[in-house]
Amino acid sequence: MATDEPNFSINGGVSHSTFAVGSHAHAESHHGAAVQRDQAAEELLKAVRELRADLTRVRADERTAELDAALAETEEEINRTGQAGPTRLERVRQLLQDSQALVGLIASAGAVAGLLGT
């Protein structure tokens, strides 16, 4: 049985490898490429992490749980993309405005609110 297809073999592991097979194949690798964040995103990420840590020190309720979930999503988005999108920022901004008593109580909430322009 004859074939015109080229043969290839891989000996050993292929983790962290990039390869393409075929006449029109294209391979692109981004292994370990760190997401670039600007100074504003770095400051917001730091403030979000501090606020999340501070939230563990207050009595949890529905509002703090909702705020923590939004902050966790913001942190994840900044880590994944290098920034938080406008919709996400508006959501956190609104939750902080709804929790003015909390913002006054926790300095890190004020820091996040300040970075969001509230």
Image (tube, rainbow, N blue to C red):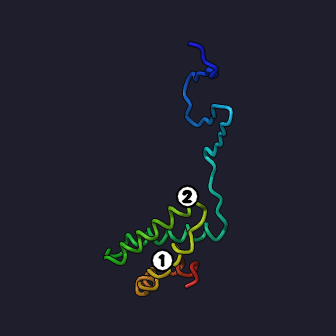
Q: Residue at x 63, y 49 (%)?
A: 33
As helix, strand or loop, the secondary structure at mark 2 comes to helix
Estimate the spatial distance between the alpha carbons at disc 2 and disc 1, rounded to whole Å: 18 Å
For residue 91, the mark is 1
- Amino acid type of disc 2? Arg
As helix, strand or loop, the secondary structure at mark 1 comes to helix
Q: Position of residue 89 (x, y in %)?
A: 53, 75
Residue picked out by circle 2: 80
Answer left or right for 102 relative to 118: left
Question: Is residue 14 placed above or below 71 in the rendered structure?
Answer: above
Q: Residue at x 64, y 31 (%)?
A: 22
Which quadrant holds residue 82?
A: bottom right
Q: Quadrant of the N terminus?
A: top right
Q: Are marks 2 and 1 in contact (CB under 8 Å)?
A: no
For residue 73, the mark is none
Q: Residue at x 68, y 36 (%)?
A: 24
Q: Position of residue 73 (x, y in %)?
A: 47, 66
Mark 2, other Cα within 10 Å: few <14 / some 14–19 / many ≥20: few
